[in-house]
């Protein structure tokens, strides 16, 4: 434990405070000041310059009737549900790596899983954007190659009526409003998360080999072993990744900004709240309104964090 | 570690080998798709658009196009990479330097207001960065840090403090107290204690945090996109965004540029692989 220093002695030891002051100044200037400024300016009509006019709660009233904002929360909700399923590959791969007998293979698979993290995120993002390219993109080439295209075309003609899959025309993945959200969801297939896999593996490490052997004697199959041995042990890690994923999805907009641009793609189909905030500030110059959207996001995320802290205890 | 006796090993090993194969296939299949983008990047960087259209999938022998592509990429990426390395190294170093000092303060002593200051850091965890970005932009404008690499560094250092201080404080608290007391007996001041006890004993965790900070800086594109305007100040993030925005695209050029942009991290990874993987798994446990 840290040594307790009474007030009298503290006056003598005042130099200790110098150790914490640089960090404090940094967070005060670059984190607390902007946060307070955001709260303050959400009540103003502000273009980012010196002129500003107090308008009370008008920004929030405007946000209530802002259809784009509502729609963007709807999109984020869909993305969260999709991301929930996208956690499965990481869990499956972690479990299978853990079940390997050879420690050496376990190590090398870990290395391979981490490799995508080493390539700059942006590079990965742009390669995927290239995959979606209608003329050069691999996705269309693969569809033609495995002859899935005719199936999609008839699905579109008879069921979906989106008129996006047409015989003889390349599929415009990122420029058709109907296809934007599906493309965002498919993005990054097979959705292996390096951090996720490593975290799950760290959780699985406490299971000894003999536990498996006992289970095998009892005639447990692979899935039962997962259900009764592995899943309960990594539940803490799954919850941790879950809350990180939800918060990350609610506030993230880098992917949408780079794949679709500031307007969220054709028809604004890929618009998410963070991107709408970015758009309002840097494209429309409505800094005050952007701050108000930021506040709404903040409250949203705060509630999620508090729910997490209250109901989901993470054991250390 | 298997606790089997020698006689049963052979029987079990044969049985296990059979069971192992599907597992390997499963992992390899997923990894193959996961790594497909990087394979494509590598092999397209050997080609120009015509060659790519004729043969999109298979690699070809290196030729004049490869040299041409990489010459283009080298000239394009080098200045961006230099800026990025400057920003990432400076930010990660400053980040850890300040974080170690603050963590030492919190871990070793309980001064008046320690708790208040600690909660000032913890509260920050609740404020998502997304709400700050708009006022941060105007703040940097006022401070004349817009369109400057120092603005980027300042923001990166400030935003990394909380996590690093949090992890380091836990770590320093676990160091044996006798060491510090013995050092104090010998008349070592706080600086000496940090340099001779804290830093040597927390080497691996400092290394891991450094890599994470460095990686965060290297991968960031939102802040550079907002802060930087002059092309000669561009970091890799903004540079690649502008490259992608070009109207007529030569995919060979672009993929070669992507490869060049990934190279520094790949080289760093080769040397820090163990630290990296252990650090990520351990960091995961600490939360």
Image (spheres, coloured by chain):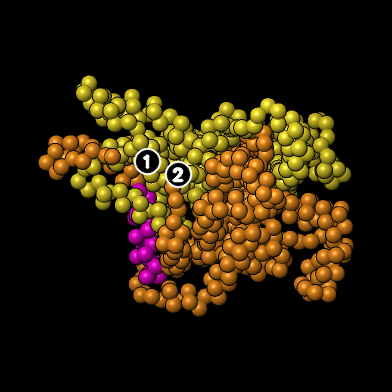
Q: Quadrant of residue A160?
A: bottom right
Q: Nearer the viewer, residue B243 or A94?
A: A94
| Residue B286, numbered label | 2
Image position of B101 (left or right of B154): left
Q: Colour of chain A?
A: orange
Is B128 in front, or is B165?
B165
- Left or right of B79? Residue B18 is right
- Chain yellow in the figure, letter: B
Between B221 and A202, the residue placed more toward the observer is A202
Q: Are marks 1 and 2 on the same chain?
A: yes
Q: Quarter-wise, where is residue B206 in the image?
A: top left
Q: In the figure, residue B258 lies in which quadrant?
A: top right
The 10 Å Cα crowd at callout 1, few under 14, some 14 to 19, many 20 or more, is some
In the image, which residues are magenta?
A27-51
Query: At 80% across and 74% down in the image, what residue appears?
Result: A159
Decide whether residue A45 is among the magenta residues.
yes
Residue B58, disc: none
Q: Residue at x 50, y 64 (%)?
A: A277
């Amino acid at each position: 434990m840290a040594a307790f220093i009474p007030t009298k002695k503290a006056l003598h030891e005042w130099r200790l405070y110098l150790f914490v002051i640089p960090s404090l100044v940094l967070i005060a200037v670059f984190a607390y000041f902007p946060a307070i400024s955001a709260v303050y300016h959400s009540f103003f009509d502000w273009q980012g310059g010196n002129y500003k006019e107090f308008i009370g709660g008008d920004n929030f009233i405007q946000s209530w009737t802002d259809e784009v904002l509502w729609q963007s929360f709807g999109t984020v909700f869909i993305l969260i549900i999709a991301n929930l399923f996208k956690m499965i590959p990481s869990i499956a791969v972690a479990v299978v790596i853990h079940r390997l007998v050879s420690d050496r293979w376990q190590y090398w698979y870990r290395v391979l899983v981490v490799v995508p993290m080493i390539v700059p995120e942006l590079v990965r993002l742009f390669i995927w954007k290239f995959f979606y390219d209608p003329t050069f993109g691999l996705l269309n080439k693969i569809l033609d190659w495995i002859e899935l295209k005719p199936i999609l075309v008839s699905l579109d003609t008879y069921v979906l009526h989106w008129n996006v899959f047409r015989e003889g025309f390349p599929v415009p993945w990122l420029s058709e409003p109907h296809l934007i959200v599906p493309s965002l969801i498919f993005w990054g297939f097979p959705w292996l998360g390096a951090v996720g896999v490593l975290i799950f593996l760290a959780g699985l490490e406490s299971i000894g080999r003999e536990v498996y052997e006992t289970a095998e004697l009892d005639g447990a199959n692979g899935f039962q072993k997962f259900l009764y041995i592995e899943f309960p042990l990594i539940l803490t890690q799954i919850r941790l990744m879950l809350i990180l994923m939800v918060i990350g999805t609610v506030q993230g907009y880098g992917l949408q900004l780079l794949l679709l641009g500031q307007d969220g793609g054709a028809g604004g189909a890929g618009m998410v709240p963070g991107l709408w905030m970015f758009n309002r500030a840097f494209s429309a110059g409505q800094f005050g309104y952007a701050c108000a959207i930021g506040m709404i996001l903040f409250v949203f995320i705060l509630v999620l964090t508090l729910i997490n802290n209250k109901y989901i205890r993470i054991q250390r | 570690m298997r606790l089997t006796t020698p006689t049963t090993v052979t029987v079990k090993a044969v049985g296990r080998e059979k069971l192992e194969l599907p597992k390997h296939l499963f992992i390899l299949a997923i990894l193959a798709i996961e790594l497909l983008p990087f394979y494509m990047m590598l092999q397209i960087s050997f080609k120009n658009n015509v060659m790519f259209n004729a043969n999109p999938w298979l690699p070809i022998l290196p030729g004049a196009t490869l040299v041409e592509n990489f010459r283009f990429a080298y000239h394009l990426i080098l200045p961006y990479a230099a800026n990025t390395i400057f920003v990432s190294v400076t930010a990660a170093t400053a980040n850890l330097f300040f974080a170690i000092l603050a963590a030492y303060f919190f871990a070793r002593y309980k001064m008046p207001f320690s708790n208040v200051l600690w909660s000032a850091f913890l509260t920050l965890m609740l404020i998502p960065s997304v709400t700050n970005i708009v006022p941060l932009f105007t703040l940097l404008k006022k401070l004349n840090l817009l369109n400057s690499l120092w603005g980027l560094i300042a923001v990166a250092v400030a935003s990394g403090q909380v996590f690093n201080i949090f992890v380091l404080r836990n770590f320093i608290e676990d160091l044996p107290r006798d060491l510090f007391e013995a050092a104090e007996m010998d008349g070592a001041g706080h600086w000496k204690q940090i340099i001779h006890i804290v830093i040597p004993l927390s080497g691996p965790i400092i290394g891991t945090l450094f890599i994470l900070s460095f990686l965060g800086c290297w991968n960031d594109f939102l802040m550079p996109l907002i802060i930087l305007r002059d092309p000669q100040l561009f970091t890799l993030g903004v540079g690649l965004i502008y490259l992608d925005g070009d109207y007529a695209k030569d995919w060979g050029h672009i993929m070669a540029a992507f490869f060049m942009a990934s190279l520094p991290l790949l080289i760093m990874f080769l040397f820090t692989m163990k630290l990296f993987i252990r650090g990520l798994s351990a960091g995961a446990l600490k939360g």
